[in-house]
Amino acid sequence: TVFENAKAKNCELLVFITDKSCNYHLEIKSLEQTFQILTQDIGYATAEKLFFSKDTKKNIVNKLNMKLGGINYVIDTPYFKDTKLVIGFESSQFGGLNIAN
C-alpha cells in the first residue's frame, strides 16, 4: 500500500488529493494512526484553486508546516526584552455553524 511504502522509506508526510465523491478521509486518518505518518487530505476543488488563489496556497503551506512541527507566526513584543510570543493553531471543521430557532 501507499502507507507501507512510505513507512519503508521513512516518509514524514503523505498528501492526498481526493474528489468529494470518494470519501477516503476516515480511511486516510485511520491509516495515519496505524502507520504513524502524518497526512493531509486536500479536496480536488481546493487543489484546483492552487493555480490562481494565493490564499489557498498560503493556507495549505501553513497547515503542512504546522503538521511538520514548524512555527507559522512569531511576534516580537516590546514589553519583554528578548521574549517572543509564538502562536500556532489549526482548525479543521466540517461546514459552518447552523443555529436553528
Image (spheres, rainbow, N blue to C red):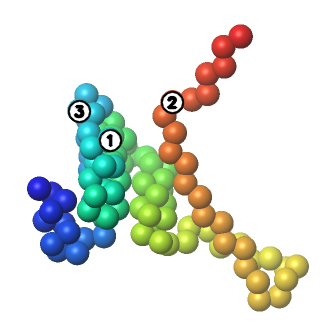
Residue neighbourhood size for the residue with mark 3, other residues' Cα within 10 Å, grouped as few (<14), some (14–19), many (≥20): few
Q: Do the CB atoms of the residues marked 2 and 3 lie less than 8 Å apart? A: no
Q: Which residue is found at the position 46% from the left and 58% from the top?
A: 63
Q: Nearer the viewer, mark 2 or mark 1?
A: 1
In screen coordinates, is 8 left or right of 86?
left
The part of the image, by quadrant, that contains residue 78 is: bottom right
Q: Residues within 10 Å of mark 1 (few under 14, many from 20)?
A: few
Q: Residue furthest right?
A: 79
Q: Earlier in the sequence, mark 2 or mark 3?
A: 3
Which residue lies most toward the bottom here? Answer: 82
Residue 79 location, x and y as percent?
A: 88, 79
Q: Which residue is mark 2?
A: 95
Q: Is residue 96 left or right of residue 28?
A: right
Position of residue 71 measured from the top left corner of the image (x, y, whole percent): 55, 71
Residue 91 in the image: x percent, y percent? 55, 48
Q: Which mark is residue 26?
A: 1
Q: Nearer the viewer, mark 1 or mark 3?
A: 1
- Residue 68 percent coordinates (x, y): 42, 69
Please name whichever residue, 6 or 71, is drawn nearer the observer in this view of the structure.
6
Q: Quadrant of the N terminus?
A: bottom left
Badge 1 amino acid: Leu
Give the camera-side residue of 56 and 13.
13
Q: Look at mark 3 in the image and give the residue it sits on.
A: 22
Element at label 3: loop
Determine the secondary structure under disc 2: loop
Residue at 61% across / 27% down in the picture?
A: 97
Q: CA distance from mark 2 to mark 3?
A: 18 Å
* Displayed quadrant of residue 43: top left
